[in-house]
Amino acid sequence: MTDEASTYTKRDVFDLGSMFRSSATISFVIQIAAVILMIGSLIAFAIGDLFLALNDELKVLLFLIISILFLAMFLAAISIFVRFSRRIGNTVVGPGIEQVRFDTPGVKGVVILYGVLVALMAILGIYGWYLIDIYYLTPFAASFNSISLRIFGLALGAFFIAFLVQIIIAGVGRSATKVIIEVLDADDDEEFLR
């Protein structure tokens, strides 16, 4: 009997809090990586011709300095991520909800609507950025014949799309958890009245 109950809970219980937190965390990581790429591509664009004009010994020295700066930025980004990861998770998911039974019809509907909304927001961001990219950023990078500016445009697009998705996650995540809590409370009340 206990084996049956444990397999039932493993199969039908859904960790909703973890899903909301993971979505927000992934978009935050994409934003951090995009900012590092943007800074790196702007530095590469600024010193591109100068770098090619240097002799080999100075190229190695400059490469080492740039590597140290990038590692320092990466460590600072990890520090920011560790500090704000829990705060982002608590902002997105309110208290009182972690694991829910996924076979509850109201819960399943809210989760599906949430997923569709996040996917549509991501598609809107990707398509909007695609239009900005083909009409403005690609011609701008082509006018300088620069791969660095092209990388900057792509990183800026990733940041923009992740930011849009994060806004919708932060805006909808808390309200979705409230709706799910109300659905679960109503379901518990109905079971109690029976």
Image (cartoon, rainbow, N blue to C red):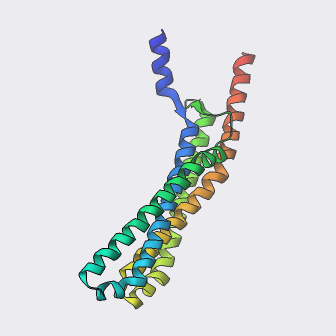
**Residue 183: horizontal and vertical position, in percent?**
69, 33
Look at 68% across and 41% down and name the residue there: 94
- In the image, 13 versus 28, the foreground residue is 28
**Residue 91: horizontal and vertical position, in percent?**
66, 47
- In the image, 178 versus 86, the foreground residue is 86
Tell me: 45 left or right of 108: left
Tell me: 167 left or right of 32: right
**Residue 40: horizontal and vertical position, in percent?**
43, 72
Look at 57% across and 37% down and name the residue there: 16
Q: Is residue 20 above or below residue 162?
A: above
Q: How many marks do you count on the picture?
A: 0
**Residue 103: horizontal and vertical position, in percent?**
55, 29
The residue lying furthest to the top in this view is: 1
The residue lying furthest to the left in this view is: 56
Choose top left, top right, bottom left or bottom right for residue 55.
Answer: bottom left
Report the quarter where the C terminus lies.
top right
Q: In this view, does 177 lie above or below 79?
A: above
- In the image, 189 versus 64, the foreground residue is 64
Tell me: 69 left or right of 95: left
Look at 58% across and 42% down and name the residue there: 111
Look at 45% across and 86% down and name the residue there: 140
